[in-house]
Amino acid sequence: MSKKLTALALLLAASGVVQAEDGDLAAIRAQIDEMKKTYEQRIAALEQKLAQAEAKTAPTAAQPMPAVERAPAATSAASGFNPEVSLILQGQYRNMKQLDERGITGFVPAGGHDHGAGEIEDGSKRGFSVNHTELVLAANIDPYWRGQAILALIDGAVEVEEAWFQSLGLGQGIGLKGGRFRSGIGYLNEQHPHMWDFSDAPLMYQALFGTHGSYAQDGVQAKWLAPTELFVELGAEAGRGAAFPGTDRNGNGRGAAALFAHVGGDVGVAHNWRAGLSWLTTEARDRAAHFEGVAGDEVEGAFSGSSRTWIADFVWKWAPDGNPKYRNFKFQTEYFQRQEKGTLAVEANEDAYRTRQSGWYAQGVYQFTPNWRAGLRYEQLDSGTRDFGSHAATVLVEDYRPKKASAMVDYSWSEFSRVRLQYAQDKSMLGITDHQITLQYVMSLGAHGAHKF
């Protein structure tokens, strides 16, 4: 009898536990259902706002979709609490001549990323080295704004390369950006090094902006996309202008301004193109530079005045049936002309100074299988006319046309991993022919947005 009572007691206890567990499960299910309803309501509200924004910005005529990058979609899965995170790993082995000081003959040294006194600038590093490791954080802030920050990490130093916010649907084709960003001038300028088709920037960009090969500034940018069949984009910028060819003057108002226009479209199914024209103006105050003296010595100078740059760019792409996955070809070229006017102080003597210089590059890259690409690039600069005034008696003025020819082949296991072999014959310095061999890797970890056209 006692055994039966014990078994009955155990059965009742187990039943109580099951009922308690069933109660807990029911509570959990209720909480999940409530969360689903809440998120469905929020998603529905956001979809309604998106539909209203699209209705306001919809053009009267149907627009084609040329292969040109549009603004990021407002429906990105990332949010302020779940940002897109990526890490770009770049490194190389470079074999080239040992030169005490590299530069481009006939052009004022623009500098680059050396990250502290005593460090070797990136463009002069031989053997094995690690380039910038880029940490990218990006997300939609809300349905109206998107933010992104790119931090360059190298040898214990951190550099804020970009940190900006961007509008997501103001309507009427208008877009706004503010913070630190790469300027929209030219074609290559907005692209980060891991997006380049060659391991280094063209001589044109190095002469204009330094070995890092781009112009970035703190400021604001406005763009307008025309509601036309032809892709038409107009843009304007105003910023601090602290980067070369300007200097940080720590003043009120703008230190630099830029204007640019891009047009593009499709030619049949297999071809598309883009052309652009840009203008950059900036001011310099006591911009340091050194020149070779007529006696073979080094002469220090300081330039104060204005710098004006014009850039024309053109890109043509081909892919069979419009599908670039298996085969494609890209041709791109850019031309610049820069004028500087002001005063040059040399050894406490100041006199008028003006220059007019120009240059260009052209390159073609052919992807002949899904994994393999090969490319050629040729570039040439012109030191142009340079008026040193009375300083011509102490400063050696050399007329020269720097040249460089490069060939590369690269292999990509996927869109996130690439290794590249490049050979270049560099004649950018008077009297020197440098045969350079570079083996480079580019690896991308994490979320990665679409590249520019």
Image (cartoon, grey):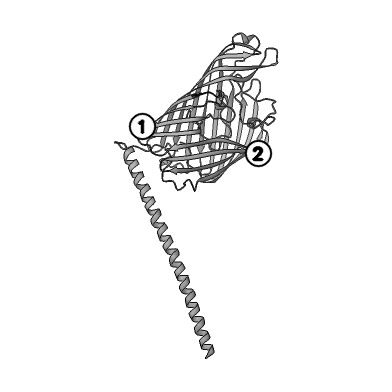
When asked about the image quadrant of residue 130, the answer is top right
Q: Please indicate, yes or no, whether residue 317 appears anywhere in the rendered image.
A: yes
Which residue corresponds to mark 1? 226
Query: Residue 163 has which mark?
Result: none
In the displayed structure image, the side of residue 451 where residue 300 appears, left or right: right
Q: Looking at the picture, how far across and down is residue 396, in whole percent? A: 64, 13
Task: Tell me the SS state at disc 2.
Answer: loop
Q: Looking at the picture, how far across and down is residue 163, in whole percent? A: 52, 36
Q: Indicate the amino acid at tag 2.
A: Gly
Mark 1 Cα-neighbour bin, 10 Å: few <14, some 14–19, many ≥20: some
Task: Tell me the SS state at disc 1.
Answer: loop
Q: Return the residue nearer the eye: 149 or 28.
A: 28
Which residue corresponds to mark 2? 156
In the displayed structure image, the side of residue 363 where residue 61 appears, left or right: left
Q: Looking at the picture, how far across and down is residue 427, in whole percent? A: 62, 24
Q: Residue at x 45, y 32 (%)?
A: 316
Spot the residue most to the bottom. Answer: 1
Q: Residue at x 45, y 69 (%)?
A: 23
Q: Indicate the amino acid at tag 1.
A: Ala
Whole-angstrom CA distance, mark 2 to mark 1, is 45 Å
Q: Nearer the viewer, mark 2 or mark 1?
A: 2
Mark 2 Cα-neighbour bin, 10 Å: few <14, some 14–19, many ≥20: few
Number of numbered discs on residues: 2
**Relative to 384, residue 418 above or below:** below
In the displayed structure image, the side of residue 305 where residue 71 appears, left or right: left
Q: Return the residue nearer the eye: 347 or 271.
A: 347
Q: Residue at x 47, y 33 (%)?
A: 178
Q: Please indicate, yes or no, whether residue 183 appears anywhere in the rendered image.
A: no
Q: Residue at x 50, y 45 (%)?
A: 84
In the displayed structure image, the side of residue 157 where residue 267 appears, left or right: left
